[in-house]
Every structure is written in C-alpha cells, then in structure tokens.
Image (cartoon, rainbow, N blue to C red):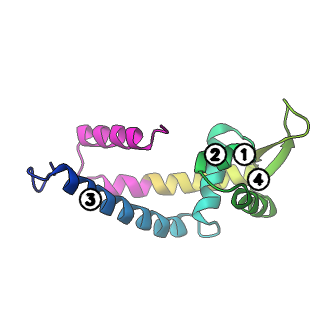
C-alpha cells in the first residue's frame, strides 16, 4: 500500500522501493560531490565511519562497506596523503594498524555533517515528527545487517 495508491500489491511496492532507492542513491552521489567535493563518496564514507568509531582496522572497513580490501587500501592511502587519516600501531596486535581520522579529517567530517544536517532539515520541512520517526525506524530496519 502506498500513499498515492492504497491498493498497491506487494510486488508493485517492492518495485517502487527499488526505483526510489536507486533514485536516492544517485541523488546521494550527486549531493556528495557538493558536500565534500575533494573526496569520493567512498572515501568520505570511510572517514565518517572512522570518526564515528574512533578508528578501526582496514579489514573492518572492508567488511562494513562490503568492499574489496584493495579498494579500501586505495581509499585509505588517498585519505592519508591528504592528511585526513593517520595510521597507528594496534594496541591489541603490534603487527596490525588502527586507522583514525586526523584533526583535519575530523574537521572535514564535522563540516560536511553540518552541511548535510541543514540540507536534510530543508528536505523534511513539511514532514511531521511522527513521519520522521517512522521513516528513521524503517531506514534503520532496512539497513540492519542480517
């Protein structure tokens, strides 16, 4: 059932969801270039996750984003070259490395987060609190790792 057509079948609803998530993804990539033009969406997502977690290993990034380790390695190297990420010897295994955002990386994440927050606030101006809460819960449920 959709807002415009309360008689949508389950298959039709899944088709609508697929189409809308594809449009959302494309729009997100486009907006990403505006929010942090110096970084790819993948690189910024890695930096953002590192900031949220306070750091982690490259293998954890690959698992989280379902990326090949070589892709993560290239993105990490680029972030490090830009001074947005630092490598530290892992406390639990001196052979491993923990990746952390640098001070500049934390500023980049913070600045972009504020720009995104403002853009989302504008986008949701006409939404009620209950609608926002329901949408947030549905997205969390959809994105939960099985």
The CA distance from mark 1 to mark 3 is: 34 Å
Residue at x 76% of width, y 53% of height: 85
SS for dot 4: strand
In the rendered view, would you say 31 is above or below 14?
A: below
The label nearer to you, 3 versus 4, is 3
Question: Where is residue 5 shown, x and y percent of the image?
Answer: 10, 55
Q: Earlier in the sequence, mark 3 or mark 4?
A: 3
Q: Main secondary structure of the magenta part?
A: helix
Q: Nearer the viewer, residue 121 or 63?
A: 63
**Residue behind mark 2:** 63
Q: Mark 4 sits on what residue?
A: 85
Q: Which residue is mark 3?
A: 15
The Cα–Cα distance between marks 2 and 3, rounded to whole angstroms, is 28 Å
Tag 4 or tag 2, which sits nearer the N-term?
A: 2
Residue 114 position in % (x across, y down): 51, 52
For residue 112, which numbered disc appears in the image? none
Residue drawn 67% across the image and 56% down it: 68
Measure how far apart labels 1 and 4 are at the Cα level.
Answer: 16 Å
Please tell me which residue lies in front, 89 or 7: 7
Q: Which residue is mark 1?
A: 59
Instruction: Name the element at disc 2.
Output: helix
Across and down, in percent, residue 45 comes to: 59, 54
Mark 3 to mark 4: distance in Å? 40 Å
- Relative side of 81 to 17, left or right: right
**Badge 2 density bin: few <14, some 14–19, many ≥20, Cα 10 Å:** few
Q: Residue at x 50, y 57 (%)?
A: 115
| Proximity of marks 3 and 4: CB atoms separated by less than 8 Å | no
Figure check: 5 above or below 59:
below
Q: Which residues are magenta?
A: 118-146
Q: Nearer the viewer, mark 1 or mark 4?
A: 1
Give the quadrant of residue 77. Answer: bottom right
Marks 2/3 in contact by CB < 8 Å: the verdict is no
């Amino acid at each position: 059932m959709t807002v415009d057509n309360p008689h949508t079948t389950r298959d039709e609803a899944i088709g609508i969801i697929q189409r809308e998530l594809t449009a959302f993804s494309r729009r997100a990539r486009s907006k990403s270039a505006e929010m942090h033009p110096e970084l790819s969406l993948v690189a910024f997502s890695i930096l953002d996750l590192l900031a949220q977690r306070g750091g982690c290993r490259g293998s954890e990034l690959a698992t989280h984003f379902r990326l090949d380790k070589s892709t993560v390695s290239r993105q990490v190297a680029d972030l490090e070259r830009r001074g947005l990420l630092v490598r530290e010897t892992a406390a639990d295994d001196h052979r491993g490395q923990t990746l952390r955002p640098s001070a500049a990386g934390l500023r980049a994440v913070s600045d972009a987060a504020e720009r995104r927050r403002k853009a989302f606030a504008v986008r949701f101006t006409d939404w009620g609190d209950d609608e926002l809460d329901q949408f947030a819960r549905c997205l969390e449920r959809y994105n939960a790792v099985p």
